[in-house]
Amino acid sequence: MSYRPIKAQQSHNVLQSSVTLQRLMARAQATDHLQQLLNQFLQPAAREHCHIATYHAGILSLIVTDGNWATRLRYQQKRLLKQLQGLAEFSEIVRLQFKVRPPIQAEKAPTRSIKLSEQAGQTIQASADATQDPVLREALQRLAQHAKKP
């Protein structure tokens, strides 16, 4: 058997043919619309730290980037709830729920720094001078250069 790749299709054709993708897109668009409505009532500084997770059975779950913002929003909970209840989309809302989830960030590799005393540098340089292998000698010489100079 040989592998036959599926021919590429235009995105609108894929969306029209897949009911699951249509539901997913509709849900994403609805969540985006609800987020825009929520942003009207949030302070400008809080908008980037608060996102809608779910809205189900009258409970609006919000994801907040850290505990400080969650505390601030909890103090404003009654005001936000009343304002959101005034909108048709949130007419059935009875409670706000805040969940803290820090943003995912790529872990940075720790920077390596070599700190050698002058005596350690001299010892490494002496070892480099006595080494026959040219690759090892060069590596030891590079390492010896990191020693503190008087």
Image: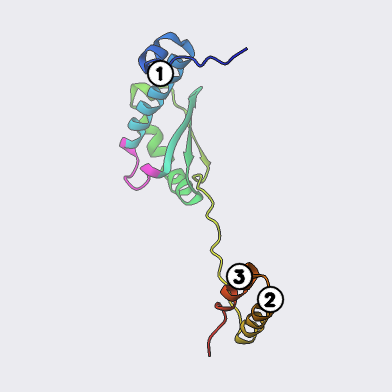
- Foreground mark, 3 or 2, reads 2
Helix, strand or loop at mark 2:
loop
Residue 133: which quarter of the image? bottom right
Looking at the picture, which amino acid does disc 2 mark? Thr
The numbered mark, 3 or 1, whose residue comes first in the sequence reads: 1
Q: List the single residue furthest toward the top.
A: 17
Q: Is residue 47 magenta?
A: yes
Residue situated in front as seen by the camera: 108 or 134: 134
Is residue 2 placed above or below 68 in the rendered structure?
above
Is residue 92 placed above or below 136 in the rendered structure?
above
| C-alpha span from label 3 to label 1 | 59 Å
Please give the label number shown on residue 131: 2
Helix, strand or loop at mark 1:
helix
The numbered mark, 1 or 2, whose residue comes first in the sequence reads: 1
Q: Look at the numbered discs 1 and 2 and tell me whether their residues touch, using CB distance below 8 Å.
A: no
**In the image, what residue occupies the spot 34% across and 36% down?**
39
**In the image, what residue occupies the spot 40% across and 18% down?**
26
Q: Is residue 85 visible?
A: no
> What span is in magenta?
40-48
